Image (spheres, helix red, strand yellow):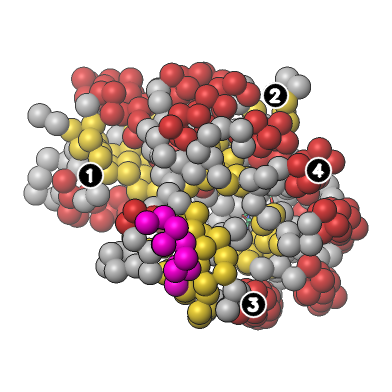
């Protein structure tokens, strides 16, 4: 009888990549994927711990599964990801319905863990940091999850210890995968139809393997036949080295959107956060990149209401957003995380934080809307990813990652096509494929 696994993923791109690799792994012991959790013999929740309520989300979710399987044989229930790492044994104690807890650096052990559980029904926990073995193991199992736009993990973990952040505790120390292993995986993705590769890591620009850096990877991957676009995320301003900045001069395929989280526009707050960079350093990077190519645009992450944030610090954040003119960004109210340095700091008034978040988001949305409006009437290159859900149109992305919906055909999937933009809203551009393109193809 075939076994079915249902995988639910919360969190960042790393978790999405991990979920796909977990599936590639459990396939080896006979699991097929199901999109309907009620059909599953194995329910895996890949969790995120970055902001609060993460833990509660896990128990709520498992509660729903428990209810649905009330009168049937229960599936094997696995909690993976960053909550698994942070809470480990606690999870098994609190919810006996959960069978296994597997941390992000132990996925290579997942098949043995599942088979052992099937054999003796024991509760199991695997949360050691064993990143080297994990990637050695995974590199032997092909990454079969090629989409037009695919993720490729090149680096994991973090040594920076920003005072608000759980990542160094949940993902462990910084680790860079061997260069050749990454190139091999990129070639495999390209052979399976990937046209865009996003290199990912918690600190992707800290990549450092023997003599190779992120800049070397980008320049090598762009030689791979079939690869048309390269992106990377998430980067830290401190690791925005000269060689990486210069790749924007030399690369043909690196996209002109730089996601460079700043968190706050105030040096005082950056220091309190232990960010290891100043606004001045950030602006220098901005200027250098704009000098290389004035079409390069920026996006960022902001934490609002960090302990100690005063009105003038907040004003500095607003000023920075106006100076850089971010085209797209994420902003969150500071969330106190157990085990981090900032967990012990006094919170600012939460009503003030909420108000500030509203102001910041309005400003960021305004930028986004006006950037999208600026494309109306213009023709842009779109990498076609899919048909829309109702199959009546095609969906793709601009060079700046903006969603584009237009009147393409199924055969356009995987191609870069010119689209004339007619309309836009905050998140999407709408247009028509340029007629002469269709004629040329025909
Ligand atoms: N390594 C990246 C960097 O240094 O910019 C960030 C990776 S983190 C997974 C993604 C984002 O989550 C951060 O940029 C930050 O804005 C947000 N974040 C992390 N911890 C947070 C917290 N305690 N409260 C609110 N937002 C948080
Ligand atoms: Fe977290 Fe990024 Fe800071 Fe590392 S550099 S601790 S991942 S916010
Ligand atoms: Fe969340 Fe872990 Fe990613 S905490 S943001 S899933 S690294």
How crowded pointer 2 is (Cα within 10 Å; few <14, some 14-19, many 20+) is rated as: some
Q: Residue at x 65, y 31 (%)?
A: 220
Q: Is residue 435 magenta?
A: yes
Earlier along the polypeptide chain: callout 1 or callout 4?
1
Question: Mark 1 — residue?
Answer: 34
Q: CA distance from mark 2 to mark 1?
A: 37 Å
Q: CA distance from mark 4 to mark 3?
A: 28 Å
Q: CA distance from mark 1 to mark 3?
A: 42 Å
Element under disc 1: loop
> What label does residue 275 carry, if any?
none
Q: Up-down: is 115 above or below 101?
A: above
Q: Nearer the viewer, mark 2 or mark 3?
A: 3
Question: Mark 2 — residue?
Answer: 209
Earlier along the polypeptide chain: callout 4 or callout 3?
4
Element under disc 3: loop
Q: Up-down: is 151 above or below 435?
A: above
Element under disc 4: helix
Q: Position of residue 416 (x, y in %)?
A: 50, 54
Earlier along the polypeptide chain: callout 2 or callout 4?
2
Q: Position of residue 434 (x, y in %)?
A: 48, 68
> What label does residue 246 carry, if any?
4
Q: Does the residue at mark 2 contact the one at mark 3 (Cβ under 8 Å)?
A: no
Q: Residue at x 25, y 23 (%)?
A: 29
How crowded pointer 3 is (Cα within 10 Å; few <14, some 14-19, many 20+) is rated as: few
Element under disc 2: strand
Report the magenta residues as a range: 432-442
- Within the image, what quadrant is residue 261 found in? bottom right
For the N terminus, the image quarter is top left
Q: Nearer the viewer, mark 1 or mark 3?
A: 3
Question: Mark 3 — residue?
Answer: 374
Q: CA distance from mark 2 to mark 4?
A: 19 Å
Q: Does the residue at mark 1 contact the one at mark 4 (Cβ under 8 Å)?
A: no
């Amino acid at each position: 009888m075939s076994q079915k696994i249902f995988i639910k993923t919360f969190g960042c791109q790393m978790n999405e990549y991990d979920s796909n690799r977990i599936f590639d792994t459990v396939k080896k012991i006979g699991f097929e994927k199901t999109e309907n959790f009620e059909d599953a013999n194995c329910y895996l929740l890949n969790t995120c711990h970055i902001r609060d309520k993460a833990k509660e989300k896990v128990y709520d979710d498992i509660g729903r599964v428990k209810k649905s399987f009330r009168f049937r044989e229960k599936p094997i229930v696995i909690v993976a990801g960053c909550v698994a790492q942070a809470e480990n044994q606690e999870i098994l104690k609190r919810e006996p319905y959960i069978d296994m807890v597997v941390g992000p650096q132990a996925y290579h052990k997942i098949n043995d863990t599942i088979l052992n559980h099937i054999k003796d029904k024991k509760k199991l926990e695997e949360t050691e940091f064993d990143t080297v073995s994990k990637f050695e193991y995974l590199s032997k199992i092909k990454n079969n999850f090629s989409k037009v736009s695919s993720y490729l993990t090149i680096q994991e973990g973090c040594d920076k210890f920003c005072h608000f952040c759980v990542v160094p505790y949940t993902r462990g120390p910084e680790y860079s995968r061997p260069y050749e292993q990454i190139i091999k995986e990129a070639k495999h993705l390209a052979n399976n139809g990937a046209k865009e590769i996003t290199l990912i890591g918690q600190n992707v620009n800290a990549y450092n393997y023997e003599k190779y850096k992120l800049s070397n990877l980008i320049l090598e991957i762009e030689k791979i036949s079939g690869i048309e676009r390269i992106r990377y995320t998430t980067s830290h301003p401190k690791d925005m080295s000269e060689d990486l900045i210069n790749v924007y001069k030399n690369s043909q395929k690196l996209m002109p959107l730089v996601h460079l989280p700043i968190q706050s526009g105030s040096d005082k707050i950056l220091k309190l956060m232990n960010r290891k960079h100043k606004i001045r350093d950030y602006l220098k990077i901005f200027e250098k990149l704009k000098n290389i190519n004035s079409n390069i645009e920026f996006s960022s992450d902001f934490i609002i209401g960090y302990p100690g944030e005063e009105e003038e610090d907040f004003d500095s954040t607003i000023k920075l957003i106006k100076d850089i003119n971010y085209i797209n960004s994420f902003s969150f109210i500071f969330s106190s995380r157990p085990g981090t340095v900032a967990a012990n700091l006094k919170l600012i008034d939460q009503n003030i934080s909420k108000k500030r978040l509203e102001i910041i988001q309005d400003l960021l949305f305004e930028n986004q809307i006006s950037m999208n409006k600026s494309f109306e009437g213009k023709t842009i290159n779109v990498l076609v990813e899919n048909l829309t859900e109702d199959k009546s149109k095609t969906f793709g992305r601009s060079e700046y990652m903006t969603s584009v919906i237009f009147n393409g055909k199924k055969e356009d999937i995987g191609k870069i096509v010119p689209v004339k933009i007619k309309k836009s809203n905050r998140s999407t551009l709408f247009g028509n494929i340029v007629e002469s393109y269709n004629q040329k193809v025909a």
